[in-house]
Amino acid sequence: MAEIVFGMGSSHGPLLSTPPEQWDLRAKADRENKNHWYRGKTYDYDSLLRLRAPGFASDIAVETRRERFGRCRQAMEVLGRKFREAAPDALVIVGNDQREFFNADLTPSITVYRGKEIYNARDPHEPAPGLAIAEPGNAPEQAIAYPGASDLADHILKSLAEEDFDLAQSDSRPQGASRPGIPHAYGFIYHSILADAPPPSVPVILNVHFPHNQPKIHRCLALGRALRRAIQSFQGYGRVAIVASGGLTHFVIDEELDQQVLSAMAKGDEEALGRLPENVFKVGTAEIKNWLPVIAAMNAEGRRYHQVDYVPCYRSEAGTGNAMAFVYWD
């Protein structure tokens, strides 16, 4: 029988791999964006700036950026070290796809990847300012294949089907995928946290972004409890880790919402998470849902929660950017 020995949650995002002096590359796109989602409504940049007056000018000074970038990189090192100390035999990663793997022709709600290999490569065609510069954080210079845990993936598929989860499965990168490898939510974990040396793993891909089949909060929590039961009943590995990739609030940072989520994690309070309104989980903030299955699994397992750091990385006066969080359970 397998035991879940370690849990981890890490933000991913271009600011983690971009020199802080160049965070303005993405701020330019923020200022041009007419549809910033914030607390259930959309705003153009100027309206968002007025709403959040006096703004965040002091948070975007280059000295502040450097300090926060350094904290993020240090926290990433802590997570990598703790993972190695836990020494799991296998890994389940809960993340999301942003039209890198599936395109609009097919958008599964929940997918279990069961391939024998997991291919990670930089996207050579990424044109967006502030994104191309961050690709070295998502994959090594030379493409690499990591081992998949196909037997564990099949067991998860069968076990969750018995619990009335209707899942999609994938054996390889779909034809027509825009990215040459696994989505960056996974590539970042494999490359920047695990140093391209993960144990055999199973990516679980959630559609948190695209209407109309995003899993709801309660379904994500139920998925985590079911994943725990599936992993525990598997005979092939002794020690398994489960990891969340994504979040926290972005592209408009909402520290109040982030603190609600972090407080609920610290207390193991799934009822508090369940009371959060669905309409805040839009755009990048929707990636917080990637954390919910891991939170539920760790709560059920009774593991201890540790917050390594929470770092709001602002890149404009209107409060756009990415709030980064780094936690683990042992």
Image (cartoon, helix red, strand yellow):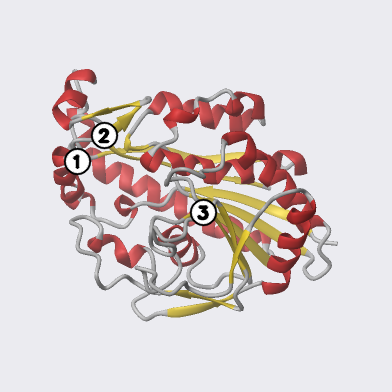
Residue type for callout 2 = His
State the residue lying farthest toward the front: 105
* Residue 233 occupies quadrant: bottom right
Query: Answer yes or no: do the residues labelled 3 and 2 have beta carbons within 8 Å?
Result: no
Residue highlighted by disc 3: 95
- Quadrant in which the N terminus is drawn: bottom right
| Percent position of residue 279, x then y | 44, 29
Left or right side of 86 for 260: left
The amino acid marked with disc number 1 is Asp
Give the alpha-carbon distance from disc 2 to disc 1, as whole Å: 8 Å
- Residue drawn at x 77%, y 49% as measured from the top left: 163
Q: In screen coordinates, is 15 left or right of 232? A: left
The residue at which mark 1 appears reads as: 30
Q: Judge the density around disc 1: few (<14), some (14-19), many (≥20) Cα neighbours within 10 Å.
A: many
How far apart are the two marked residues, 1 and 3, measured between alpha carbons? Answer: 24 Å
Residue 246 seen in render: yes
Residue 219 quadrant: top right
Instruction: Look at the numbered disc 1 and give the secondary structure of its residue.
Output: helix
Q: Which residue lies under the disc numbered 2?
A: 36
**Percent x, y of residue 5:** 73, 55
The answer to whether the residues at label 2 and label 1 have Cβ atoms under 8 Å apart is yes
Q: Residues within 10 Å of mark 2 (few under 14, many from 20)?
A: many
Q: In terms of depth relative to the viewer, which is nearer, 121 or 113?
A: 113
Q: Specify whether 291 is left or right of 154.
A: left
